[in-house]
Amino acid sequence: MGRRVLVRSTNWLGDAVMTTPALLRLREKFPDAHIALLAPEKLADLWANHPAVNETIPFAPGESVFSVGKTLRAGKYDLALVFPNSPRSALEVWLAGIPQRIGHARPWRNFFLTQAIASRLDSVTMRKLSVAEIRRRTGVTPVSNQIKNNLETGRMPVLQTNAHQIHEYLHLVAALGANPEPLTPRLFVTPGEIEAMNKKFDLSKIERPLLGLNPGAEYGPAKRWPMEKFIAAASEIQKRTNCTWLVFGGQADVDIANRIESAMASPPSAIWNLAGKTSLRELMTLLKICRVLLTNDSGPMHVAAALGTPVVVPFGSTSPELTGPGLPGDPQHRLLKSDAPCSPCFLRKCPIDFRCLNGISTERVVEAVLQIIR
């Protein structure tokens, strides 16, 4: 009888995509194992048709840790790999009675693991900047030259490609003897799903190129390039390519998507507003069909890249070196940053003047998209 492996998924869409290289390496190490993935039900469909996963076990929002543990106990798993760093995720597999339980060493949870893995030597912490530090770095609050010099030494160091988050998950599977070398994050949709989307939206009749637009970001406004810039860039690209934009987003993005649609109402075929109207699998299939996705740093950014669709991304409060799409350094993507001294701050809301994203011009974004289309 082969091994029965339980993997506790991360809770966010983008993070889940970044675990796929580790899952593929895990499958490579245990080709005959039954690998089950415990995931929030909102992410369960992400793993359909994925070669690294045999089974997905969804859990509902608010479901108790004891209920999850009871469900897992019935699976009789002999190994658990815990990707999140939370105490709860380690407690779940402990309550399931899984004999071998591996995860990162973190406070309040090591007791529940049989093997608590220390962080990599190359690991970089995403430290949030304080409002006071942001104001000093940007000159909003005047400081002496001596303090300025001290602040410069505290900025984010120049990062190597092995600083990326995918290496944190690869580090865990390496503890099981798996190959720690990175792979490109991968997701999969079937030809049947693509055919169904073509029929549902009658896409085969559109002779113009299909481009994707994702103006939202669930994390917060500090990751959102201004709506007016999205409208200006999308309008200019449409004029120069005669494309049709597919606008994506969840329920929280419906308002901004409607405003973008209203601003680009002419010609009518220039934009299709799909915000809040697609399931996760439908979103994945449509992203696969797009020639390029213009997007904020978000879950759909990671999904598109993992499906092989190039992305253009203005980065503000976050770091592409740590959580960028695809394999670090992949030349098919365009990851744009300004020279704001306070970026990355890793905050949800900007406490000053949003200079990191305002500093990325519409012209830069337009040219990045056109480079990919050419």
Image (tube, grey):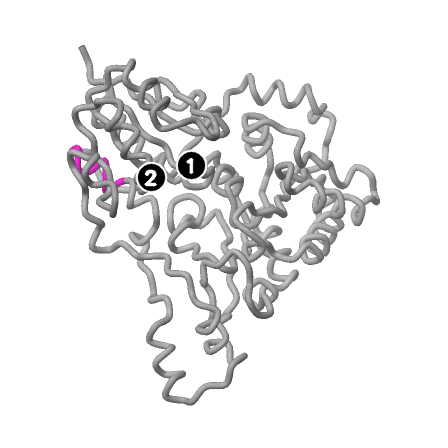
- The CA distance from mark 1 to mark 2 is 8 Å
* Extent of the magenta region: 170-177
The amino acid marked with disc number 2 is: Pro
Q: Front-most of 305 and 343?
A: 343
Element on which disc 2 rests: loop
Say left or right for 374 vs 22: right
Residue on which the image places disc 2: 84
Q: Residue at x 48, y 34 (%)?
A: 307
Contact? badges 1 and 2 (CB < 8 Å): yes
Q: Front-most of 11 and 91?
A: 91
Res. 63 image quadrant: top left
Say left or right for 13 vs 236: left
The amino acid marked with disc number 1 is: Asn
Return the x and y of residue 338 as percentages of the image width and height.
Answer: 52, 66
Q: Residue at x 46, y 57 (%)?
A: 318
Res. 108 image quadrant: top left
Question: Which disc, if any, is residue 11?
Answer: 1
State which quarter of the image contains the N terminus.
top left
In the rendered view, tell whether residue 43 sits above or below residue 75.
below
